[in-house]
């Protein structure tokens, strides 16, 4: 049934001569997944105990998580275990130099690049142990791409005990959001990481030793979905409420907490070919030249060969740039400058993108955070 564009529904789909309306691929609009927001002042999760925890001692392992950092220029640690002696302290997180470190204490692997943006990113820290030499090599992957690796084999990690998620031995607390934390007792390959980083797991996968979806909407205990019993307990800093710490996660799916499918609305998948687009009816009377905002949830594909229109008309446009995954806000009829975003949007996950025009100021927002803004010198 056709609906007026003003009620927020898309109408009057325009497609090329080789497709019919029934041929348009669709995917579930899906239910929002939750993550946990840490305030950087004392919030953290605790997993296991001194005598009963996931054993990574002198063995291969992989630790994965999604993180959205709300800070920069400060220490924001995500995983810690052990003590402050050589190869006895496991630490993963951001240093005050805004690099990610994967440390065994006194034996560190660090990224060369710095990271200060506020977008969701997937991180995987892999240690590949060789029993014959009793040494191994570490790897750091960001969004499925290799970010750092050891130049040679080194000493293994040699401690056990409980884990803290969101701090460094009781200090240097993480400020931001975390979700989908996974511990594997195996060295995951890059292909393994890429294939599963945006997929909810069952919990029964081979080698998966601990898995916390962090989807529970209330309370302070988060179930280990592997069934191994390593539930995570949330400690809250003074003045916080556990139920207020829930935030939308990095990606969504249509699987409920119990594992059953949830029916919902749909999104349209565009294949990037000329002619496949959606047009809104009855928009000629809407004046978008003085002040306006426009937004959309987007799920970018891998192909960025050509510039791609996301939203727009003859006067303005929000586009995905060719050659990378940044967006730009262009205007023509009322102001001729283009504002180019600074954040590369992750492919394969849902991302909220918004633009605003305030009469002489353009702004681009990514997932609710200001990406870039500029005041026009040519507005008329």
Image (spheres, rainbow, N blue to C red):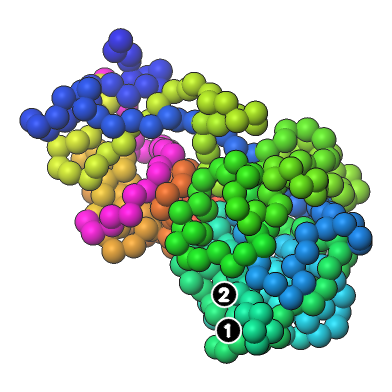
Say the numbered circle drawn on residue 27. Answer: none
The residue where tag 1 is placed is 150
User: In the displayed structure, does residue 42 sit left or right of residue 24?
Assistant: right
Viewer-side residue, 321 vs 29: 29
Report how far apart the C-alphas of labels 2 and 1 lie in the structure: 7 Å
Q: Which residues are magenta?
A: 282-306
Q: Secondary structure at mark 2?
A: strand
Q: Is residue 108 visible?
A: no
Q: Residue at x 32, y 24 (%)?
A: 10
Viewer-side residue, 136 vs 146: 136
Say if the magenta span includes residue 327: no
**In the rendered image, the vertical position of residue 286 relative to residue 176, given as above or below:** above
Q: Is residue 224 visible?
A: yes
- Quarter occupied by the N terminus: top left
Viewer-side residue, 126 vs 349: 126
The residue where tag 2 is placed is 139
**In the rendered image, the vertical position of residue 326 relative to residue 368, given as above or below:** below
């Amino acid at each position: 049934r056709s609906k007026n564009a003003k009620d927020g529904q898309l109408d009057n789909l325009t497609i090329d001569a080789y497709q019919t309306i029934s041929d348009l691929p669709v995917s579930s609009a899906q239910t929002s997944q939750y993550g946990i927001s840490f305030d950087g002042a004392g919030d953290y999760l605790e997993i296991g105990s001194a005598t009963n925890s996931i054993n990574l001692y002198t063995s291969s392992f992989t630790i994965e998580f999604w993180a959205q950092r709300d800070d920069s220029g400060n220490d924001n640690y995500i995983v810690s275990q052990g003590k402050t002696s050589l190869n006895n302290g496991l630490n993963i997180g951001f240093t005050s130099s805004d690099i990610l470190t994967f440390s065994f204490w006194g034996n560190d692997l660090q990224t060369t690049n710095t990271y200060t943006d506020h977008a969701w990113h997937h991180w995987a820290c892999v240690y590949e142990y060789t029993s014959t030499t009793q040494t191994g090599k570490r790897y750091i992957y960001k969004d499925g791409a290799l970010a750092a690796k050891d130049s040679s084999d080194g000493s293994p990690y040699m401690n056990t005990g409980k884990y803290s998620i969101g701090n460094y031995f009781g200090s240097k607390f993480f400020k931001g959001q975390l979700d989908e934390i996974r511990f594997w007792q195996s060295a995951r390959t890059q292909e393994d990481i890429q294939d599963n980083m945006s997929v909810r797991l069952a919990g029964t996968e081979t080698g998966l030793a601990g898995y916390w979806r962090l989807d529970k909407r209330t309370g302070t205990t988060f179930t280990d979905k592997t069934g191994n019993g390593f539930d995570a307990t949330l400690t809250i800093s003074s003045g916080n409420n556990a139920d207020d710490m829930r935030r939308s996660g990095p990606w969504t799916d249509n699987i409920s907490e119990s594992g059953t499918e949830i029916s919902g609305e749909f999104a349209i998948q565009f294949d990037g070919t000329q002619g496949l687009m959606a047009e809104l009816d009855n928009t000629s009377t809407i004046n978008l030249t003085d002040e306006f905002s426009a937004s959309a949830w987007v799920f970018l594909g891998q192909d960025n060969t050509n510039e791609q229109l996301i939203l727009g008309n003859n006067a303005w446009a929000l586009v995905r740039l060719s050659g990378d995954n940044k967006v730009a806000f262009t205007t023509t009829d009322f102001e001729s400058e283009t504002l180019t975003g600074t954040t590369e949007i992750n492919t394969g996950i849902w991302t909220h993108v918004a633009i605003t025009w305030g009469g002489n100021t353009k702004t681009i927002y990514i997932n609710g955070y200001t990406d870039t803004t500029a005041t026009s010198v040519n507005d008329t």
